[in-house]
Image: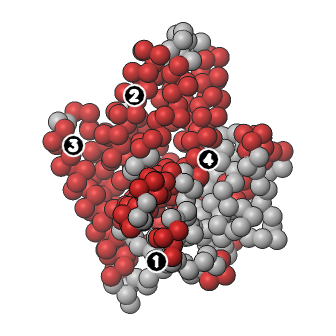
């Protein structure tokens, strides 16, 4: 069974849990959902899986190539300790990948998609980038060098990803001792916040102990509620632009700066860094958390119903495609992905264009 097929099987569980979280929020008077935001977040997850049909082969292929030619020894895939050690080591590699995703502009251009939502709920967990393969594969090569078979690598990567789904909620509070060892909702809420004290903290995937060891842990403080989103808001429901936004900003700054060294530095400095001549010529207003306004253009009931109907149809079509993608030619795969992405763009367009 392919990884895409496993995601297909997990999708009904994701959607049922979203429904439960929504119902709990309504019952508590703490609804954390907006239809337009949820459709955009889930749609970006769909788009990530569609493009993953191509990029997944690249990343696993590079890992397999390194395993075959650089492995110091070969570990047995039928040994339980190999799987456990592989999961822990993968989580450590993920920590550094995730941390660099917040501190290196090129990597943030990909990872920032996951943080664009100004709401925080289980649909946010599904909001994934389509360009994470750019540079991301490098962080897991130590596993290949140490001899973890590609089967183990692929499986523990999926486990690590699926674990992180449940921590994207505001309906679960602090969990005591569990929070001290594992990534939990309270810890991950901090990670998604743009508050000064919370910014760029709590990178752990399954284990939060990496943050405690490497100085990036911050506990959630009930006296300072988390404010979600990014410091450069997307302000769009276009899923294609969501993936291109920060790359475009980096390319624009790189083009505008006069110094050749700065044209390169733009891509590898921390997010937000700008060459002095660009900052002077094209200044940006300073970030003010008290002036943040959620992007929530009004939708008519007709637009909501139409967007939801198109989205449900797209989910069905995506399910069929992902289940059968390995049987299709490259041209058929590309055509199918293009059509489905166009459908996702249509949902975003409907979410922005029809006010009551």
Nearest-to-viewer mark from 1 and 2: 1
Q: Label 1, label 3: how many angstroms apart (C-alpha)?
A: 44 Å
Q: Which mark is residue 99?
A: 4
Furthest-front residue in this view: 259
Q: Which mark is residue 333?
A: 3
Q: Are marks 1 and 2 in contact (CB under 8 Å)?
A: no
Residue 14 in view, yes or no: no
Instruction: Please name the residue that numbered disc 2 is placed on.
Output: 62
Q: Which mark is residue 281?
A: 1
Of labels 4 and 3, earlier in sequence is 4
Q: Is residue 335 left or right of residue 224?
A: left
Q: Residue 34 at x, y = what percent?
A: 51, 73
Of labels 1 and 3, earlier in sequence is 1
Q: Is residue 13 left or right of residue 27?
A: left
Secondary structure found at label 3: helix
Nearest-to-viewer mark from 1 and 3: 1
**Is the residue 271 above or below the residue 328 in the image?**
below
Secondary structure found at label 2: helix
Instruction: Locate residue 29: give its quadrant.
Output: bottom right
Q: Label 1, label 2: how many angstroms apart (C-alpha)?
A: 42 Å
Q: Are marks 2 and 3 in contact (CB under 8 Å)?
A: no
Secondary structure found at label 1: helix
Q: Is residue 266 left or right of residue 122?
A: left
Q: Residues within 10 Å of mark 1 (few under 14, many from 20)?
A: few
Of labels 1 and 2, earlier in sequence is 2
Q: Label 2, label 3: how many angstroms apart (C-alpha)?
A: 21 Å
Q: Are marks 4 and 3 in contact (CB under 8 Å)?
A: no
Q: Residue 21 at x, y = what percent?
A: 60, 61
């Amino acid at each position: 069974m392919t990884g895409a097929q496993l995601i297909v099987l997990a999708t009904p569980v994701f959607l049922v849990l979203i429904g439960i979280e929504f119902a709990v929020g309504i019952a508590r008077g703490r609804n954390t959902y907006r239809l337009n935001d949820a459709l955009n977040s889930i749609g970006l997850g769909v788009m990530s899986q569609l493009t993953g049909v191509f990029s997944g082969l690249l990343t696993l292929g590079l890992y397999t190539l390194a395993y075959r030619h650089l492995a110091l020894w070969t570990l047995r895939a039928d040994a339980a300790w190999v799987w456990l050690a592989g999961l822990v080591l993968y989580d450590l590699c993920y920590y550094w990948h995730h941390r660099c995703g917040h501190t290196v502009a090129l990597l943030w251009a990909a990872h920032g998609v996951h943080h664009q939502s100004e709401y925080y709920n289980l649909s946010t967990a599904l909001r994934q980038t389509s360009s994470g393969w750019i540079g991301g594969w490098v962080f897991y090569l130590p596993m290949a060098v140490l001899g973890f078979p590609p089967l183990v690598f692929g499986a523990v990567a999926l486990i690590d990803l699926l674990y992180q789904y449940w921590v994207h909620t505001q309906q679960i509070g602090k969990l005591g001792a569990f929070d001290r060892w594992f990534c939990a909702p309270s810890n991950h809420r901090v990670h998604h916040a743009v508050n000064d004290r919370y910014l760029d903290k709590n990178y752990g995937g399954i284990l939060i102990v990496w943050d405690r060891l490497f100085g990036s842990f911050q506990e959630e403080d009930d006296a300072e509620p988390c404010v979600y989103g990014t410091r450069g808001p997307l302000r769009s429901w276009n899923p294609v632009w969501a993936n291109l936004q920060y790359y475009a900003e980096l390319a624009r700054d790189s083009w505008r700066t006069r110094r050749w060294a700065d044209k390169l530095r733009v891509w590898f400095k921390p997010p937000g860094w700008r060459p002095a001549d660009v900052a002077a010529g094209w200044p940006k207003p300073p970030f003010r958390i008290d002036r943040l306004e959620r992007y929530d253009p009004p939708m008519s009931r007709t637009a909501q119903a139409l967007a939801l109907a198109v989205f449900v149809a797209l989910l069905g079509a995506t399910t069929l495609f992902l289940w059968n993608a390995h049987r299709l030619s490259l041209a058929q795969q590309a055509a199918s992905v293009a059509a489905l992405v166009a459908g996702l763009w249509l949902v975003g367009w409907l979410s922005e264009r029809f006010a009551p």
